[in-house]
Amino acid sequence: MGRADARRAQARESRRAPKSGGIRRLFTWKKLLGAFFGIVLLGMGAFGALYVYVDVPAANAMAERQSNVYKYSDGSVLARTGKGVNRQIVDLDEVPEKVQHAFVAAENKSFYKDQGVDLKGTTRALLNTVSGKGKQGGSTITQQYVKNFYLTQDPTVSRKLKELVISLKVDQQESKEKILAGYINTAYYGRGASGIQAAAQAYYGVDAKDLNVSQGAYLASLLQAPSQYDWNTATDTGKKLVKERWAYTLRNMVEMKWLTESEKAGLKFPYPDKPKPAQGMEGQTGYLVEAANKELEKQGVSAEDREAGGWTFTLTVDKKRQKALEKSVDDQLESKLDREGNKVDATVQAGATSVDPKTGKVVALYGGEDYIKHYISNATRQDYQPASTFKPLVLASALENESKTQDGSLIGLNTVYDGTSKRPVVGSDTPFAPQNQDDRSYGQVSVQKALNSSVNSVFAQMIVDVTPAAVKETALALGVPDKNFPERPAVTLGTMNASTWDMAGVYATLDNHGRKVTPHILQSAEHRDRTVNAEKPKREQVISRASADTVTKGLTGVVDAGSGGAANSPAYDAAAKTGTSEDNKSAWFAGYTPELTTVVALFGEGDGGRKQVSLTGTANSGRASGSGFPARIWADYTLGALGGGSGKTFDLQDVERGEVPAPPTPSDTPSEDPTPSKDPTPSDSPSEDTPSGTPSDTPSSSTPPPPTSTPPTAPSTSPEIPPLPGDGDGDGQPGERPGGNGVAPQ
């Protein structure tokens, strides 16, 4: 039996062997190589068939470009753009030769020698399209001309294959000069300009024939990213990139011997003129359209795609609330300004963003006096400091991190701090001793009272207790941009840069119980060929509900008994914070109700937007603070936007009251007019423009009473410190001055 079993096993193995060997024989190197070449031949055959099948088509419908329609959230039309094409065809001989060479140097050095296509680049672009990575580089000038003149901008495989075939044929049928002329006359340069003549006018106010090589190199550099590289609207990164692209273009010109090294060395970067808004963009329309266009780019709709026309864009903007915001600014500010006869009034710029705190939808936006007159949107600009509207975020971070004071007390609304003006902070490697508004000392004061009157010295110590690094982490999570944001004690006074749009998102997140709210203005984008669905913002919990609701509770005190009194109304429940930056260059009011979050700001802007100036003297009213014009605009708008009011109240949970330390000994009790233990260092000095006293209309009885020797055990028993008459922001003294005043005007 043993031998028989062995023979049967051997037989079974022998039967298996041919099968295994058959599989191996199936995948021999010869067969694999043959299959590969077979596929290549099939591909070549298919491409050959495609080459025969695809003819050079007639010019595309650029000349018949449709307009784009922008709509309010209710479907009513806000604006129509692109009814006509901003293009004027010019002959190539009208364009200076060195400018022609600049385009070739920037886009396709081998243009005069190649066959019209870049197989490597096209293959990469095809793979990117198939893998969903979108439109990415690799085209020659001929291919880009074919795409612009004969095809569409759609990022599809079929369009890319057609582009390849037509480019080969066009290169054989047309001269390089005609192709180059077609390219520079059809390319999109931004600012609504298609073609080099329109671009020359839009950026330099000259005809194409009068462009110099430096200007030509800039226009050629623009083609890589027209919106990102437009100097007047570019970010710092965009400006850096376009300068590098400009230099790259000139280096290539030298390499190709179209420019000498000495000529290159004598060229300076050609800063373009300010853009001129298109007709039909008057009033707030242009600001709304601009905000929507910026968001469209983030959603993958480039300026080039958009300018091709045929789109219907629906915004989140509520038409009634938009009109209400415009009316409130006119009634509460513009009607009181003398822009022609008062130098200060001429510099005042207002901006505002209003957001639904549950969805992040921007329901109203105020960008400035008029888009035609003032191209920069005051709603989205990020070149001013948000000042003391940042202080609640210091408290939010303290709550979120369960931070304690220097004596070990858990920080909350009842926690008592020393509110002495110019009091040096304790526990920081960076000296900081900020001055309170009007150099007023508050003695022992609760966090709630410090919020109400925006006491600088309290929040200076609080950020040290929490640590600037932890506060920055919380602030970024809430939505403050990382712009001029060092981890130093002075940032407690809002010395970083932010826009009303940014701060509306931050305060909406507090309003939404700590769940992140990202403002957005695009509801939908529909084209005859495709639909772009607006990306839904993430709604993660960035701080706990208890922390957010505690801050909200504190901010209701600012409205009820503090510097936000102008917004106090029985018609709605409100929470808010005022802010006035160093030298009174900006004034803010950031507030919310359970249904609506709105941030209003004034900016002092001089020298055509290149300089920040003081708002003091606005409408002959003395210091323009956050508790003044911004608060009144906010209150008037909110009442109208809520239809006369709302019965909804804040649903606050687990509010952190905080701990009260043991009473100080008599020797620790501050005097009525305490003297700091040491003078602040020069870097900690308050603003030079800090008023030496209260405004002229301040009653003589406004001097605060001496603080009690025993700290309060609850807000209700705190020493009564009335808010500063007519102001009470307590802002304007950043102490540390990074870069002078902490702002780099754009």
Image (cartoon, helix red, strand yellow):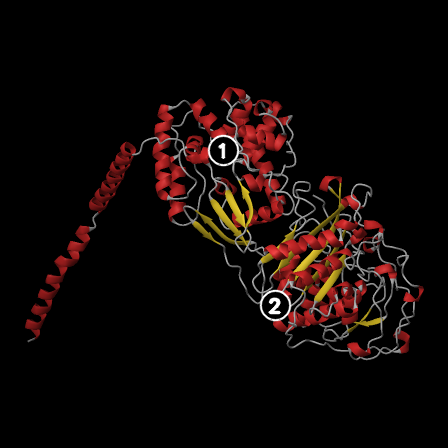
Q: Position of residue 278 (x, y in %)?
A: 60, 38
The residue at 67%/44% (across/down) is 370
For the residues labelled 1 and 2, the Cα–Cα distance comes to 46 Å
- Locate residue 729, reporting x and y percent: 79, 61
| Residue occupying image coordinates x 56% and y 32% | 219
Q: Nearer the viewer, residue 473 or 391?
A: 391
Q: Nearer the viewer, residue 147 or 341?
A: 341
Q: Amino acid at mark 1?
A: Ala
Residue denoted by label 2: 514
Crowding at mark 1 (Cα within 10 Å: few <14, some 14-19, many 20+): many
Q: Is there any visible trace of residue 426 in the rendered image?
A: no
Q: Nearer the viewer, residue 657 or 302?
A: 302
Where does residue 500 sit, x and y in percent of width and height? 67, 55
The label on residue 27 is none
Q: Is residue 365 found left or right of 581 in the rendered image?
A: left
Q: Which residue does the numbered mark 1 point to in the structure image? A: 187
Q: Residues within 10 Å of mark 2 (few under 14, many from 20)?
A: many
Instruction: Find residue 342 and report its image quarter.
Output: top right
Furthest residue in direction right, as rendered: 700
Q: Which residue type carries mark 2?
A: Gly
* Residue 7 left/right relative to 433: left
- The answer to which of marks 1 and 2 sits earlier in the sequence is 1
Q: Give percent across and percent down for residue 724.
A: 84, 64
Give residue 677's quadrant in the image.
bottom right
Q: Secondary structure under badge 1?
A: loop
